[in-house]
Amino acid sequence: MTAKIIDGKSIAQEVRAEWKLRADALKARGITPGLAVIIVGEDAASKVYVANKVKACADLGLHSVHIALPADTSEAALLTKIAELNADPKIHGLLVQLPVPKHIDSSKVLDAISPDKDVDGFHPLNVGALATGNMRFAPCTPFGALTLLQKSGVSIEGKHAVVIGRSNIVGKPMALLLLQHNATVTICTSKTSDLAKHTRDADILVVATGKPKMITGDMIKPGAAVIDVGINRMENGKLCGDIDYDSVKEVAGWITPVPGGVGPMTITMLVANTIQSAERAAC
């Protein structure tokens, strides 16, 4: 068996086209969805992420505001800027690119963003809404992973899903999204005893540990759908995920590559959340 490759790039294009229709419908009513992104400092990876987010907005005809603040910006000044954007009716989505400099409390930053504009889904109220089944914004990476499963025709209801990773950004919200779609969910970590016992029982396996190639083909249930959220740079400069792609693809039924799997979906779902926020504001 050779797994069907889940092409995140093509699915992202398909999803963006669907959401562009909704954005165009809002623009016909005089409402242009708007996203504001704040970056503090000169982190190279963060600058690339922000540029990609701004480009995605431009591609779909959304209004975007990119605010670059110096690394020595005070916490108070950042919170003031967030308050200004919270009050701006042209902004429907607002995020601060993490990480922020060490002198700024990231928890205070996330708490300061209006829950109605928190398109990253990190505000405590939105985390609680997801946990109670009243989701407003799902964090973009797990939302993208779920969409990949759905668009690839993977059945979720009644299946056993195993999530490896417990982060607030991916692992925990991924488990909650799968639960909402009636999967039976097991959460593991990289330190789970006899991890392979759990992974071999998974119809759906989502891996988000940041440990390169830790999941191998002998740990996979034949025919399983495997979603690799990890992205790691090897010593030779090449990127790889948290699964050993070459061995896993010979056992799994579906598999996401790295790069080109979950990655393209993250920004796509950010744009989707922004458009959805604008729709709510227009009601």
Image (cartoon, rainbow, N blue to C red):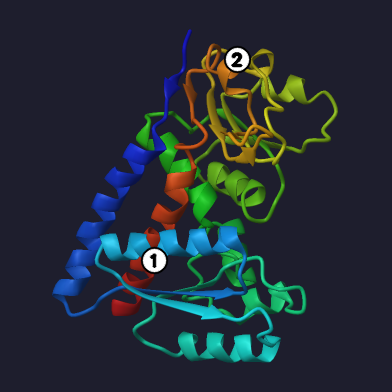
Rendered-image quadrant of the C terminus: bottom left
Q: Which residue is mark 2?
A: 247
Measure the alpha-carbon separation of dots 1 and 2: 37 Å
| Coordinates of residue 139 in the picture (x, y in percent) | 54, 57
**The residue under label 1 is which amino acid type?**
Val
Residue at image coords 58%, 34%: 238
The residue nearer to you, when weighing 276 against 82, is 82
Numbered circle sitting on residue 54: 1
Numbered circle sitting on residue 161: none
Examine the rendered structure and indicate whether residue 106 appears above or below residue 78: above
Which structural element holds mark 2?
Answer: helix
Examine the rendered structure and indicate whether residue 249 appears above or below residue 171: above
| Coordinates of residue 5 in the picture (x, y in percent) | 42, 24
Q: Nearer the viewer, mark 1 or mark 2?
A: 1
**The residue under label 2 is which amino acid type?**
Ser
Which structural element holds mark 1?
Answer: helix
Residue 276 visible, this angle: no
The residue nearer to you, when weighing 74 against 131, is 74
